[in-house]
Image: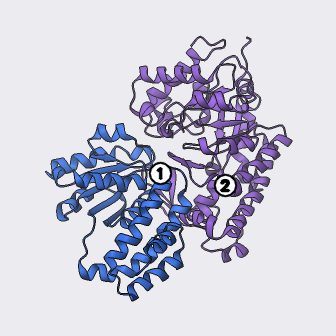
Amino acid sequence: MQALTNLERVMKAVHRQEPDMVPTFELDIDERVIEALKPGASYEDFVDYMDLDALCYHELRTDHYEVLDEAKHIVRDQWGAIKQYSGVSRAIPMVLEPALKSKEDLAKYVPPDPDLPSRFKNLEETVKRFKGKRAIISVVRPFATIIGSLREQDELFKDMIRDPEFVEGLNEITDDYYRRYVKNLIDVGADIIVETADWAFTNGPMVAPKHTAKYITPGLKKIVDYCHSRDVPCLKHTDGNIWAIFDLIVETGTDGVHPIDPVAGMDIGEAKEKYGDKVCIMGNVDCGRLLSWGSKEEVREAVKDCIRKAGKGGGYICMSGNSIHGAVNPENYAEMIRAIRDYGKYPLAV
Amino acid sequence: MFNFDELTNSVADGQVDKAAELTQKALAAQVPAKEILDKGLLPAMNLVGRDFESGQIFLPELLMAGDAMKASIVLLRPELSSTGAAYAGKYVIGTVEGDLHDIGKNIVIMMLEGNGWEVTDLGRDIPPQRFCEEIEKGSYDILGLSALLTFTMPKMPETINVLKEAGLRNKVKVMVGGVPLNQSFADQIGADAYARDAVEAVIKAKELLNK
């Protein structure tokens, strides 16, 4: 097959077709890994250097944070939540104080402005440099906004039982924000939208499937429907063991499911067999023990195994089982990319 | 004769007000607090734990049951403390250095307390030395280490090593838990047990105590 552009390769896989080779990219790559493999490189330069097939833009990278205590890494996010980052990483801050403390706060709550032009500056730059070459993917996370900014997680879970009206009110805030935000992302030039709110833990869904269907999947479906009205694919990421809610995720119409979390015991072969005709399967290379402390040989074997189980006929994007976080051994990530290129050429020979 | 089943069901169903009301009723009827705990609350937490493990209930239901249990136990505490009713054991817990996340740890604490453990919560972002100091001065059965972030996991073996160097490793059993962990990691770092969730933490803690 004639070599495809990186964008074409991703789009073929997302549409469950067979590209020239299995694509690869990551939802997030820690700056320490970038620095180790290509000192001084920006994220964009690194994507070029590694020839990754797509770039991902997170809201967090373009959001405006108000620093409240620099020494203690305490900030107020755009939703009004006060958060604290660990001294060693900007990943996953702890929520010290959510934006809303009770249902009464809903009436007076003023959400951030999704039309703020400054939000899209980085994306505009990316579009200038990469449009038509590599897939430009924008990340949105409505449920994570509720759980990570608007309401304290445990209280939200209890609200699902004791105060459904409150949860519906929170959903209305994020539905409205993300409807407008996603429109802007696509207008500016995003090729693909990915919704990355975690809906599951290692053992199973965060909340009962009936609550997932009532409170969580409708928000994704609205985004998927809008994306499809613009001919833009929409992917879904969630950590954890999702077997109990996989059908619900697929029913939203999402085009792909990431990362088929190996730490949560998700088997990629089973996912491909059950859902490979409905969604693109993405991920599954263990970034816990394997990419952090495993050997290069083990990494190559894991990549080969993923491609063998999920690559047949296309519709697979080989990625880590979450992200390339700061504890990943940079050499192992480089080896993973080499192995994808070695074993991922169609027709597959693994 | 007090109806313990009714109290058990109200806690398991997460009915906070009803659990408190029934507890008050039992105390007014001169039922000893320890008996209310043993016959009313512990069976409820067992029921909830079993249903959570088998995937019949999820975190919202578990948390509601936890609130109902707390509403009851707060009424029993004065009598439990004054009579010196025995706890299941003494547990000290914290999130390791560099990790600011404590939601999982707090759920573990809720389940342990609901099962009669006395729990000391050191909080989050706890350096190995701080754990070590606490073990040295206290008399704990188990030390629980929690982590959410993969890159803070190395703080667990570091804490175990600090305990070893201080000659305190045999003074306490060490349990580890958190999203990025698994049994093989726990084995690798020499922990005594790994628990994949709060319910399993209670089971493993009991097993460790009986060893």
Which shade of the palette goes to chain A? purple
Q: Indicate left or right for B79 with A307 as reference.
A: left
**Kind of element beneath mark 2:** helix
* Nearer to the camera, B19 or B138: B19
Residue A124, quarter of picture: top right
Q: Name the element at disc 1.
A: helix
Q: Which residue is mark 2?
A: A210
Judging by the rendered image, the residue that carries numbered circle 1 is: B53
In terms of depth relative to the viewer, which is nearer, A308 or B21? B21
Rendering coords of residue A322 (x, y %): 54, 39
Q: Is residue B187 visible?
A: yes
Quadrant that contains the N terminus of chain B = bottom left
Depth check, front residue: A152 or B57? B57
Query: Considering only vertical position in the picture, is B38 above or below A93?
Result: below
Q: Residues within 10 Å of mark 2 (few under 14, many from 20)?
A: few
Q: Residue type at mark 2: give it.
A: Lys
Report the chain shown in blue: B
Residue A274: give x, y in percent of width and height.
66, 31
Q: Is residue A178 left or right of residue B182?
A: right
Say yes or no: labels 2 and 1 on the same chain.
no
Q: Label 1 lies in what chain?
A: B
Please, which residue is most extreme toward the bottom here?
B28
Gap in Å between the C-alphas at discs 2 and 1?
18 Å
Q: Is residue A15 left or right of residue B161?
A: right
Residue A344: image x %, image y %?
A: 60, 17
Q: Residue furthest front?
A: B1
**Where B40 falls versus A21 (above or below)?**
below
Does residue B98 appear in the picture of this structure? Answer: no
What type is the residue that disc 1 sits on? Answer: Glu
Label 1, residues with CA under 10 Å away: few <14, some 14-19, many ≥20: some
In the image, what residue occupies the spot 72% across and 59% down? A174
Place of residue B36 in the rendered image (x, y in percent of width and height, measured from the top left) = 37, 76
